[in-house]
Amino acid sequence: MASRLRPKNIFGERGIEQDSKFPKDVFVISIATEGKTEEQYFDFLSEIVSDDIIKIDRLIRDDEDDTKSHPIHVIELLEERIEIWEEYGVEANELWMIVDRDKQNVSKQQLEDIIKNCEEKGFNLALSNPTFELWLLLHITDIEKYNKSELLENEKVNKTRRFIEKELSILNGRYNKSKIKFEDFSDGIKDAIIRAKELETDNNRLIDNLGTSVCLLVEKIIN
């Protein structure tokens, strides 16, 4: 299967200089699916923590009309990137994929294979069911007031938005997944971690259950 994804660049908007020096411990965050929301979130997080801690390997689609970028291709890319990182003297002690359950594009069997593949290759997987927006919602509210089945189904409420996106817009007075405002979420990071741990965080069980393991990555970064 030809890969739909390729690296946009290595770290942010700047390329790597051959003599660049990085700390031994580097978090490589590769973004699956459309990735804009996740990419922005971790861009902002890297600014308030340290650019030396988080290095984002950005991905774009070879075909800009392709809206079904698949996590399987991200695994392929991560394998390729390891050698390139080593060429620049970077020893990434952890590599992470950030993906959504995305029932529309990823079958249960495919996701099971992705999880198993990551475990075998030593890649870390931050999975959200149904989407990354659940992780954002946990920053600003306790979801006990919601019907969990409604959150899990995350049905479309109009042509462009799903249920959780609508709730983010109501609670914040705004929400644009292509241009998120980190100040809407930054004060609630620790609350989000606590709330997420009250839901499912095990990737194998996340295939069918509401929750997110993004909290495990974020907790590690801010600590």
Image (cartoon, rainbow, N blue to C red):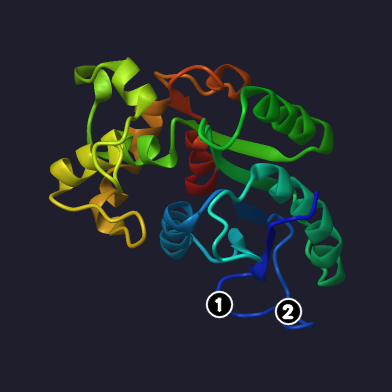
Q: Measure the C-alpha gap from mark 2 to mark 1.
A: 15 Å
Image position of 40 (left or right of 164): right
Give the residue type at disc 2: Ser
Image position of 122 (left or right of 214): right
**Can residue 94 be seen?**
no
Of tags 2 and 1, which is closer to the observer? 1
Name the residue that disc number 1 marks. 13
Q: Give SS at disc 2.
A: loop
x and y percent of residue 173 in the render? 12, 50
Name the residue that disc number 2 marks. 20
Is residue 182 placed above or below 200 in the rendered structure? below
Give the residue type at disc 1: Glu
- Residue situated in front as seen by the camera: 135 or 51: 135
x and y percent of residue 117 in the render? 78, 33
Is residue 181 placed above or below 101 in the rendered structure? below
- The quadrant where residue 179 appears: bottom left
Seen at 43% across and 21% down, the residue is 210
Image position of 156 (left or right of 171): right
Disc 2: CA contacts within 10 A as few (<14), some (14-19) or many (>=20)? few
Q: Give SS at disc 1.
A: loop
Is residue 62 placed above or below 121 in the rendered structure? below
- Residue situated in front as seen by the camera: 51 or 98: 98
- Residue 181 image label: none
Image position of 79 (left or right of 21): right
Disc 1: CA contacts within 10 A as few (<14), some (14-19) or many (>=20)? few
- The quadrant where residue 142 appears: top left
Seen at 63% across and 37% down, the residue is 125
x and y percent of residue 106 in the render? 60, 34
Q: Which of marks 2 and 1 is nearer the N terminus?
A: 1
x and y percent of residue 183 in the render? 26, 57
Seen at 33% across and 16% down, the residue is 149
**Can residue 66 be seen?**
yes
